[in-house]
C-alpha cells in the first residue's frame, strides 16, 4: 500500500518532459519503467487469473523476460505518461477485483514476482485509501 502510494505521488509530481528523459537505466526513462510495470502487471494478472480458476498456466517455451520487457516498453513508446499510468492503474484494478473474488480454498499463486502476495490485504488497503 505505502509503496504504491509513494509511486503515485512521485509520478503525480513529474512533468511529462522529465518523465521522458532517460534517467532510470541507460536505456529507459521513468515513463518506460511505468510502461514496463503496466505490461508486466497485466501479463502477471493473466497468469494469476488462470491460476485462480484452477488452471496451471505456463510461460511459453523459449520465454525471455528481457525480450518481453523490451516489447512492453516499445509498445507504449508513443504514449504519454498519463496514458501509461492509466493502463497501470487499470491493471492494478484487475488485481484488486480478482482479490475480491478469491478465497482461501483457491490455489496458491506460484508464478513470478507476485508469489506470496496477499491480494485481499492489498485490496483492503486500497479500499481504505479510496
Image (tube, helix red, strand yellow):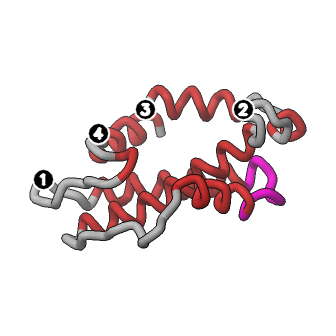
Q: How many numbered marks appear?
A: 4
Mark 3 or mark 2, earlier in chain: 3
Mark 4 or mark 2, earlier in chain: 2
- Where, by quadrant of the figure, is residue 94 drawn? bottom left
Mark 4 or mark 1, earlier in chain: 1
In front: mark 3 or mark 2? 2
Percent coordinates x, y for residue 48 in the rendering: 33, 61
Q: CA distance from mark 4 to mark 1?
A: 13 Å
Q: CA distance from mark 3 to mark 4?
A: 9 Å
Residue at 24% of width from left, 70% of height from top? 56
Looking at the rendered structure, the secondary structure element under dot 4 is helix
Q: Which residue is mark 1?
A: 104
Disc number placed over residue 24 in the picture, else none: 2
Q: Is residue 64 above or below residue 13?
A: below
Q: Which residues make up the magenta segment? A: 75-83
Mark 3 and mark 2 residues within 8 Å of each other at the beta carbon: no
Of 4 and 72, nearer the camera is 72
Dot 4 crowding, Cα within 10 Å, few <14, some 14–19, many 20+: some
Q: Is residue 5 above or below residue 35?
A: above
Percent coordinates x, y for residue 123 in the rendering: 35, 44
Q: Is residue 81 magenta?
A: yes
Q: Which residue is mark 4?
A: 121
Q: Which residue is mark 3?
A: 1
Residue at 64% of width from left, 29% of height from top? 9
Amino acid at each position: 500500500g505505502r509503496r504504491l502510494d509513494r509511486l503515485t505521488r512521485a509520478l503525480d509530481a513529474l512533468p511529462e518532459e522529465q518523465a521522458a528523459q532517460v534517467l532510470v537505466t541507460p536505456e529507459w526513462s521513468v515513463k518506460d519503467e511505468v510502461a514496463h510495470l503496466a505490461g508486466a502487471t497485466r501479463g502477471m494478472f493473466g497468469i494469476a487469473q488462470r491460476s485462480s480458476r484452477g488452471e496451471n498456466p505456463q510461460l511459453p517455451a523459449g520465454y525471455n523476460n528481457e525480450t518481453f520487457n523490451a516489447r512492453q516498453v516499445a509498445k507504449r513508446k508513443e504514449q504519454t505518461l498519463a496514458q501509461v499510468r492509466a493502463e497501470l492503474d487499470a491493471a492494478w484494478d484487475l488485481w484488486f477485483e480478482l482479490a475480491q473474488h478469491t478465497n482461501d480454498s483457491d490455489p496458491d499463486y506460484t508464478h513470478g514476482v507476485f508469489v506470496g502476495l496477499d491480494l485481499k490485504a492489498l485490496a483492503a488497503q486500497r479500499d481504505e485509501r479510496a
